[in-house]
Image: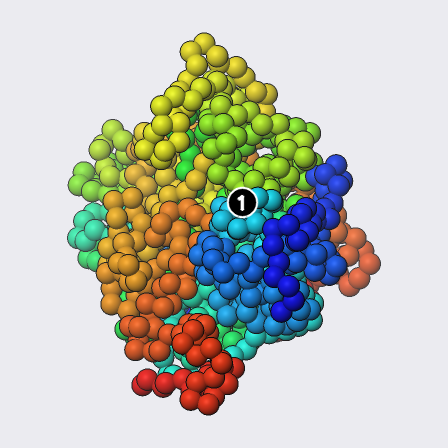
């Protein structure tokens, strides 16, 4: 390698990424961030110090070997970079776009101690998008092991688990209740943040691993989890159904027309394409003045979708301050740029209706931050006498979700008191051979955390089935610096897999 | 057991009861095996269609089919009336959804169906009969010409009361008239199950309230996914808010806030009207330009090529 890089020799400024103009993009569903071009990616890749400490790898929920894939970019060996990412994450185009990198890899980046951290997410997306464009697929040598694995839910957790189990040689079937696979990536995250074409391309890669997707299948009701492991012949099952059941606040006026959950708004607009009504049949009464309650990623998506559906004004109402907002920093920034009006430290107390039973205004109260609560965040308390009204004809609740009750109703799974599935450390549930992960275990979280849970469960399932964990094949072989073991080059080690049956 | 099929839900029978009501029998062996009285499915006719909830009107476990009875009232259902013929397939059918109805054994029970609720009350009446109950069926239609499935109901009901608005069949009046008669004749009715338009179910609940007869109603509000994810189908039951798709669709009729339900049912009315007008217009243009579409035949067993 050339001379060792130092914090003084690398490009000092984080390479900016081209974005659509805020005024223009606030009215279309095209992607906001255009992604790095080749030359931009090469400059940004040079900013990685290749430090020995590698805090970014530990900061990644799935443990991508980040310095190695960035080094491959600097070596202009892009396919090699793709291979390294896909050893641990089959969906780089998705994660590069939707991971909260500032709290993960980029948040702990060594460069970030002094300068802006390396734009790891954008580089990951660059590699992933190039793979889609060039039609690369990282199909490892797979020897069928005779085991059948059923996955419930084709969202991020299910997709990650399915990929690992297929790579281990299992026959994998993924069941999805909707008519298209993708879960929250399809129904929740809008196209301007994650285009459907990208999701479909990544799903095609999973199909190349031999994974079968069965849509229109409501597990629990069409057949039960118990039936899957008994009469349907699945040796192991993974449940990744998501949390799903949207919360409301219980304030007066919630059943007025024009009041809906962010899930309903987003599903209608994204998956059901209500934004293209009447070419598509699903309706969505567009709001003129839309108010979204909450400040997470879902709330940002709901606001920005409303803007694109033609709202004149979109308000955000959040009871804490901007610092506590759970959304990715980039999303809040993009929303601000697009003209969303933020009402921080504001809480709704009542929704007011008109004669036709439609919402016309929201009564709010100002809040101030008090003592820290159980989450460590300062607890918002109402300021007496600060009530005011926002004129609005659409109110969207984006304040989180509760556990979906279907599997609890239909399987003898042990649930915790909030209705989420109980698991042990390996994500095994109370039914032998049945594992669970993602939002249905932890409550609402992020796409990458769900993927991490899917991979963790896959590891547990492989142990349960007595399969050697293929992660070992990819792990750096530190005791063999020459990269050879028993005279076999490292890239050949795949063929030395122990078959357990 | 074979894994579920992911596409191609073939229509094997079609029957037209009137110019608005038609029946489709759809092949889906797993669904036919899993379905229980009171459950529903969500159907998409084509890839760009909307997801509409339809109560399962019948299921045949041996033939591997489920039966849906549809009233052509909006754009989607009219389009289905025009396009769904024997040999064609629906783009998506998912279910069975919802908690099955509680069938409580050897009681005296009244099953009330009105309008689009007549078909879905049938599996309930049959299930009660199979459980050993004494079943009184009450069916409401606008007139004699719209009556269907009278024979099927007679086969599983110990008594059947037909009600028509104009008195052209059975008694003249609404189903609530039938309920009054039944209660007058049988003092020992323990339960009433009603499916139909919200205003009818509200009437049924009011008719039994004073008699303290347990009254179950099946709610069919606007929903998208049917799996508890969108919350569009939330209904007020007493002091609590429930999602009809996963907490229902059956609820205690004496606790349901019907006025809230009816107000919420109208929330996409403007868009629905727009879609309907646009569709009618397109059909008119198409009809002007091409061969007139075939009239809806009673049982059309020829594969159709129009789509």
Q: Nearer the viewer, residue A489 or A91?
A: A489
Label 1 secondary element: helix
In the image, taking residue A419 as reference, residue A184 lies left or right, namely right
Q: Is residue A353 visible?
A: no
Where B138 sits versus A148, above or below? above
Crowdedness near tag 1: few (<14), some (14–19) or many (≥20) residues, C-alpha within 10 Å: few
Q: Nearer the viewer, residue A399 or A86?
A: A86
Pointer 1 chain: A
Q: Is residue A17 visible?
A: yes
x, y percentage for residue A266? 56, 45
Q: Nearer the viewer, residue B226 or A110?
A: A110
x, y percentage for residue B164? 44, 42
x, y percentage for residue A13? 68, 46
What residue is shown at x 65% (from left), y 58% (from top)? A45
Mark 1 highlights which residue? A113
Q: Point out the residue furthest to the front here.
A: A3
Q: Quadrant for residue B300, please give it.
A: bottom right
């Amino acid at each position: 390698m050339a001379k060792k890089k130092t914090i003084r020799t690398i490009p000092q400024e984080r390479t900016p990424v081209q974005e659509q103009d805020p005024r223009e993009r606030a009215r279309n569903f095209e992607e906001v961030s255009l992604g790095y071009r080749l030359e931009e990616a090469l400059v940004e890749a040079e900013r990685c110090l290749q430090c020995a400490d590698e805090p970014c790898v530990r900061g990644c929920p799935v443990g991508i070997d980040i310095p190695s894939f960035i080094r491959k970019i600097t070596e202009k060996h892009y396919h090699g970079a793709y291979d390294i990412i896909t050893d641990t994450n089959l969906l780089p185009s998705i994660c590069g776009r939707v991971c909260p990198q500032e709290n993960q890899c980029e948040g702990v980046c060594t460069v970030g101690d002094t300068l802006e951290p390396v734009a790891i997410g954008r580089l990951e997306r660059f590699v992933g998008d190039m793979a889609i464009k060039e039609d690369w697929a990282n199909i490892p040598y797979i020897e069928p092991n005779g085991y059948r694995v059923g996955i419930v839910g084709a969202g991020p957790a299910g997709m990650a688990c399915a990929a690992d189990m297929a790579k281990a040689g299992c026959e994998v079937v993924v069941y999805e209740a909707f008519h298209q696979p993708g879960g929250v990536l399809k129904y929740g995250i809008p196209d301007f943040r994650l285009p459907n074409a990208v999701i479909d391309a990544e799903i095609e890669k999973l199909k190349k691993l031999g994974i079968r997707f069965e849509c229109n299948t409501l597990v629990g009701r069409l057949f039960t989890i118990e039936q899957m492991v008994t009469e349907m012949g699945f040796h192991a099952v993974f449940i990744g159904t998501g949390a799903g059941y949207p919360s409301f606040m219980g304030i007066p006026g919630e059943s007025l027309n024009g009041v809906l959950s962010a899930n309903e708004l987003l599903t209608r607009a994204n998956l059901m394409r209500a934004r293209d009504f009447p070419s598509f049949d699903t309706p969505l009464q567009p709001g003129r003045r839309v108010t979204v309650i909450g400040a997470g990623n879902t709330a940002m998506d709901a606001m920005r979708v409303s803007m694109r559906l033609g709202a004149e004004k979109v308000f955000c109402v959040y009871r804490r301050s901007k610092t506590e907002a759970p959304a990715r920093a980039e999303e809040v920034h993009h929303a601000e740029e697009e003209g969303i009006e933020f009402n921080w430290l504001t809480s709704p107390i009542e929704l007011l209706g008109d004669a036709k039973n439609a919402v016309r205004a929201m009564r709010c109260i100002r809040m101030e931050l008090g003592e820290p609560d159980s989450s460590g965040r300062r607890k918002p308390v109402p300021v007496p006498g600060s009530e005011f009204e926002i004129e609005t004809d659409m109110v969207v609740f984006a304040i989180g979700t509760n556990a979906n009750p279907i599997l609890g109703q239909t399987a003898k799974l042990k649930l915790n008191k909030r209705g989420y599935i109980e698991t042990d450390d390996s994500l095994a549930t109370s039914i032998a051979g049945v594992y669970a992960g993602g939002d249905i275990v932890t409550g609402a979280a992020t796409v990458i955390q769900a993927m991490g849970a899917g991979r963790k469960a896959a590891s547990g399932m492989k142990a349960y089935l007595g399969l050697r964990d293929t992660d070992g094949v990819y792990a750096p072989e530190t005791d063999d610096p020459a990269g050879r073991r028993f005279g076999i080059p490292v890239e050949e080690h795949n063929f030395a897999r122990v078959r357990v049956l | 057991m074979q894994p579920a099929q992911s596409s191609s839900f073939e229509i094997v029978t079609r029957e037209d009861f009137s110019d608005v009501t038609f029946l489709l029998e759809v092949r889906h062996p797993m669904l036919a095996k899993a379905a229980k009285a009171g459950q529903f499915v969500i159907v998409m006719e084509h890839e760009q269609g909307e997801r509409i909830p339809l109560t399962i009107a019948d299921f045949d476990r041996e033939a591997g089919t489920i039966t849906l009875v549809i009233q052509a009232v909006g754009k989607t259902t009219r389009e289905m009336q025009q396009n769904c013929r024997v040999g064609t397939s629906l783009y998506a059918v998912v279910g069975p959804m919802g908690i099955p109805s509680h069938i409580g054994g050897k009681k005296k029970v009244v099953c009330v169906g009105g309008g689009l609720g007549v078909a879905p009350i049938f599996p309930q009446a049959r299930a009660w009969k199979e459980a050993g109950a004494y079943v009184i069926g009450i069916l409401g239609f606008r007139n004699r010409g719209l009556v269907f499935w009278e024979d099927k109901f007679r086969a599983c009901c110990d008594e059947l009361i037909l009600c028509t608005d104009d008195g052209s069949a059975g008694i003249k009046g609404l189903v609530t008239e039938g309920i009054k008669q039944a209660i007058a004749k049988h003092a020992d009715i323990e339960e009433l199950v009603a499916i139909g338009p919200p205003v009818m179910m509200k009437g049924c609940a009011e008719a039994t309230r004073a008699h303290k007869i347990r009254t179950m109603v099946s709610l069919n509000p606007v929903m998208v996914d049917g799996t508890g994810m969108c919350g569009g189908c939330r209904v007020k039951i007493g002091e609590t808010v429930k999602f009809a798709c996963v907490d229902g669709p059956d609820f205690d009729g004496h606790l349901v806030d019907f006025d809230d339900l009816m107000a919420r049912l109208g929330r996409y009315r403007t868009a629905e009207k727009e879609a309907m007008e646009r569709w009618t217009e397109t059909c008119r243009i198409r009809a002007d330009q091409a061969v007139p579409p075939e009239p809806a035949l009673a049982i059309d067993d020829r594969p159709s090529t129009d789509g």
